[in-house]
Image (spheres, rainbow, N blue to C red):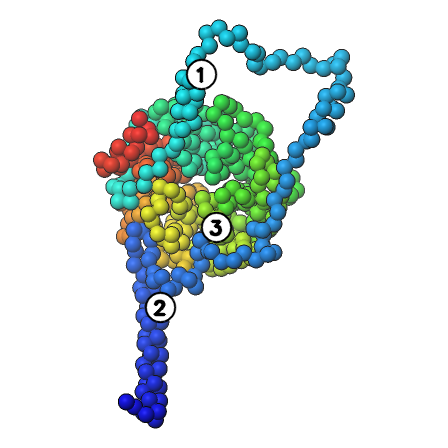
Amino acid sequence: ELDSQQVVPILQKNEAVSHRASIHRDCLGLATAFESKIFTGIVAIPQQSTSSGLSFFTTGEIPKDSPLTKSPPRQKVQSKKKLLSSYDNRDKNNAPIIFHAKIKSSGYGKTNNKVATTRKRMIHSRKVPCAEYPIHCGILDIHQPQHDWVEKQGALRSLVISRDARLAAIALNDGPALIQRLPVAKKRGQITAIGCSDKQRVAVAFSYDTNWLVTTATDSTVEIWPISQYETCLDDPIATVKNSLSEDKRKNSYRGAAARFFSLDRFLLCAQTNLINMHHFVPPGNQKLAHSFEIPGQHATAMTALNSVLSPLILAASSNRDVVALDARIGNIARVFNNAHAKPVHCLATPEPSAATSIIPQHHFDVFATAATDGVIAIWDLRMARCVKRLSSHVNRREHINIAFSPCLRYLASGSEDNCALIYDLRSAAPISRLKGHSDVVSSVAWNPLFPQFVSASYDGRLLFYTSSDDSASENTGELNS
């Protein structure tokens, strides 16, 4: 038993020891944060420092005056009375002849209703396979010649594969955008031409539900197109976001910031000079400006954002060589990465979460990559706000070449001006595969989001498909591409 005079010094001593221990833990956390390790290609830092850093998956409260809470436009639906009045007041003498597309059948040769309904249910019950993407798949360096695709109209500028891996959108250097059904070996020739050839559409992007395609032209005109499996050519978009610049400045005003859908198709992001405009998107084609972000510099050179989750973060690159992180919750700039490259960034890439990669921890997606014509690809971590890797084995001095993360987050693919496509290992920052086969600059690369398959697009007008030598990967790609 101790009296009160003996207890006070002991308590003071214990408080001093706990205070020194807390300081030691904080210093240790800071040290391990800077001495980061690579785990499955992603910089892993202590969980303590992730709370103060920036993240694509912020779960904080949204302010009442946030751009995300603004009401979207209402759909304009014509009332039934107006339709009937317009029909009764029409000029019956000059009315067109109506041919009914369907007439009542006599019932001769009618099939069994049970068989028809059963077949109908089977057709509608087909779903995209949701098996987990193999995290430890091998290198995708085996060429699949049965899927080679050739376009004779011109060079391929950009390539995007839909979320369900059933469509591939291709932007040409000179000509309309194209949609090819996948797999190519089974659906060769099933192509939809998007727009007429008098306008050069240099960038394409799918919506999350794969029902819409957004294209960006050289005059920064953004067009939204419906995707239908029965149409071979689409001439008129359902919506157009025109550039407000004068006609003289509008020509060749595209700087690389392609339009794209954002936050599960709730918004449409468009770039105009140094403004990033966030429009409400309500199908079919209704749009309303929700907010405009102003970034430093004269114009935006690249832009990206996650569309498979409700993420509030938007990344944009500026002509002054900075990369800006925009927070849509507060409608302002959240962070600026100064002097990201020696030249302006022309490509921003982020790993896209999906149902096939649900076993990967969420904080592993808080990275992004930048590419510029200085021949360097930089890997950035949002949580530490600094560059953690630099890749420079490819050649990029003139053309705008795209890059892409693999779904397993172990590799990063890049095009190159030496007619090759490179696959980097993010753990060692070294190229593990140099894929040859093109005769011109490899301008764009893409990964199959469901199975281990890699696609490269080139100025020679060809798409080349590659897969892994693993048995599991071969079986999965066989399900999709046989």
Q: Considering depth in this image, is 33 or 386 the residue closer to the camera?
A: 33
Residue found at x 69% / y 31%? 79
Residue found at x 42% / y 42%? 401
Residue found at x 54% / y 29%? 195
Does the CB distance between marks 2 and 3 fall below 8 Å?
A: no
**Amino acid type assigned to the residue bearing label 1 in the image:** Asn
Location of residue 370 with respect to 386 vertically, above or below? above
Q: Is residue 156 visible?
A: no
Q: Position of residue 340 (x, y in %)?
A: 44, 56
Q: Secondary structure at mark 2?
A: helix
Sequence-wise first label, 2 or 3: 2
Could you tell whether 348 is left or right of 479 in the image? right
Q: Considering depth in this image, is 9 or 445 the residue closer to the camera?
A: 9
Find residue 311 and name its label. 3
Q: Secondary structure at mark 3?
A: loop
Q: CA distance from mark 3 to mark 1?
A: 47 Å
Sequence-wise first label, 3 or 1: 1
Q: Nearer the viewer, mark 2 or mark 3?
A: 3
**Amino acid type assigned to the residue bearing label 2 in the image:** Leu
Location of residue 392 with respect to 11 vertically, above or below? above
Report which residue position mark 2 lands on: 30
Structural crowding at the residue carrying mark 2, measured as other residues with C-alpha within 10 Å and reported as few (<14), some (14–19) or many (≥20): some
Find residue 329 and name its label. none
Could you tell whether 44 is left or right of 374 in the image? left
**Amino acid type assigned to the residue bearing label 3 in the image:** Ser
Quadrant placement of the N terminus:
bottom left
Q: Quadrant of residue 296?
A: bottom right
Q: Considering depth in this image, is 187 or 399 the residue closer to the camera?
A: 187
